Image (cartoon, coloured by chain):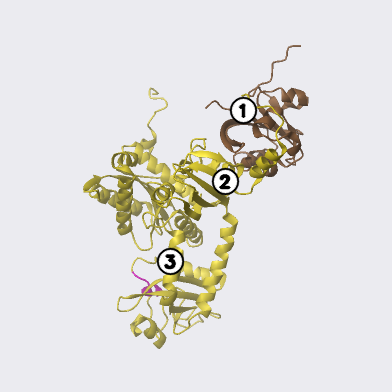
Chain colours: A brown, B yellow
Amino acid sequence: MTVTPISFDTPDLATRLDACSPEELDALDFGVIGFGPDTLVHRYNAFESEAAGLSPQRVLEQPLFTNVAPCLNNFMVAQRFEDAQDDSSVLDATLDYVLTLRMRPVKVALRLLANPGGATRYVLVQRQPR
Amino acid sequence: MSRDSAAPNEEYEALIQFLYLAPVGLVQAGIDGQIAMMNPIAAQLLMPLSRDGGLDNLFIALEGVAPELRCLADRHEQPAGKICDGLHVHLNAGGAKRGPQILSLTLLKLDASRMMAVISDITEQVRRERRLRQNEAWLNAILTGVTDYALISLDLQGRICEWNPSIGRVTGFGADIAGQPYAIFYPDDAITPEHQQDRLREADANGWALDEGRRLRADGSTFWGSALIAPLPDREPLPGDDDATPAYCLILRDIGDGRAQRERRRDAAYTDHLTGLANRRALFEAAQLELDRSRVNPRPTAVLVIDADHFKAINDRHGHPGGDAVLRHLAGILGDSFREVDLVARIGGEEFAVLLPSTGLARANTVAERLRASVAASAASFDDNRIEYAVSVGVAVASDGGASVDLLLKHADAALFTAKRAGRNRVASWPLAPQADAHQPENPDAP
């Protein structure tokens, strides 16, 4: 079986991530946060956990935009997911952002993924070389 | 990225999460604004303001909306203490855009090299306070210090129906004012004919209309007055009545006593620290009110956006104090160039704007050109140097009342950009002239 390895910019990535086991997500070299239509986080991989300094049990089943990553709660990120949900449209957008990992401002690229009807939306986080 | 992979200490993790979830923005920065640490709410509030996609420097992140910060920090001479406390920072004029419109910012200097900032979204809080203030103005008008007042009846057009002794006592005007518009109580340029009509329409819609400001006596002296206009019942003229049937009652009071206190309060919230002109908040509120009114009573509204040319070079050559001298000089010219009814504001580092009620494109272009020429013909003085400089001006007009404040400013900004690109020291207006846009013909060889 020849399947291309998953990277931050793999096309149709939401479908690929849906099929990944937790162990496979943990092996990725970028952060993965998966959350449901109710914004509760239900996937959180090792890379993101390590970068943020939070173990998964502090994050899982918590609302993403208020209790996990309030820095994303603005029109640049949270609104994009709401708009995609309202329009039943596909969201696949990459943008430059600054996260505050362990209170240090860190330049990252975010990839926002949502498929209409999909059970899981994703915020993917890749560190940018400074 | 290699990190110590030991299991995170439980207590440390709880502390980290406490900071992640704190519902205010916290930033620690160098005294030059360079950001060392920040929590997520700070990034949530500041990221939409960042022009370069990064958050390296607090002053740069806030430069477009609070240009005075660096200057405030520079001027703070004590070794430690608050540089500003709950400063209101206005982000945009509101309208359709969701999200914060007003931030509160507190800067605390820790020592010679570090400071901390607390940032929070106070949009809703300010809205509530504004409603309370309006109620307060209403109660002031009715209840406080009623020593004397002029009671004046107005006809449907706002003309004074007849003289009575109370008008004489408060304003000194005599019987010949019957038939004059009530604007006679306002200083020259302080009210337009459209504004007079607006107040009457507001009284119709709300049951009353209230305003406060400088008013004129017959001898040319002024006083601080409160004017309340209320519609009268049964005011439709009957057949055979003359035109001067009373339709409104105007109560005009000299409230000089409370003026100083009210002005100070207004000054702090609506004035730009460096220049003494109005600030962004004052401009946004005035423009919103003017556009709202122009939907009811249609007339054009013009905005000029003015930018000092090559300002960075001036700063580089003469230092920030030299740049400040230029800004104050420009503010002085702006303050002297417009009508009392116009509003002149500083809205960014070297960017100013003027709101011109009841003004069409031709007249707006004329005053913009006059302003440009008078800046070009003078110079700021600083440390025995004359600093000559010029301005570019963008002009935009909302003619149908349908534009938002943000759109009007955006159009004026686009015109300003055109003026800059065309070589600076000039005026351009929206909509942009075709030749200004045709910098790159798509198909120059087409027949």
Q: Write down the residue under mark 3.
A: B264
User: Which segment did they paint magenta?
Assistant: B181-187
Q: Chain of mark 1?
A: A
User: Where is mark 1, residue-wise?
Assistant: A126
Give the mark, 3 or 2, whose residue is nearer the N terminus.
2
Q: Secondary structure at mark 3?
A: helix
Q: Which residue is mark 2?
A: B26
The one of A68 and B308 positioned closer to us in this rendering: A68
Residue B54 location (% of width, % of height)? 52, 35
Amino acid marked by disc 3:
Arg
> Can residue A20 be seen in this snapshot?
no
Q: Both on one chain, marks 3 and 2?
A: yes
Residue B317 point in image, percent of width and height: 29, 39
What residue is at 46 percent from the left and 56 percent from the top? B287
Q: Is residue B241 magenta?
A: no
* B91 or B443: nearer the viewer: B91
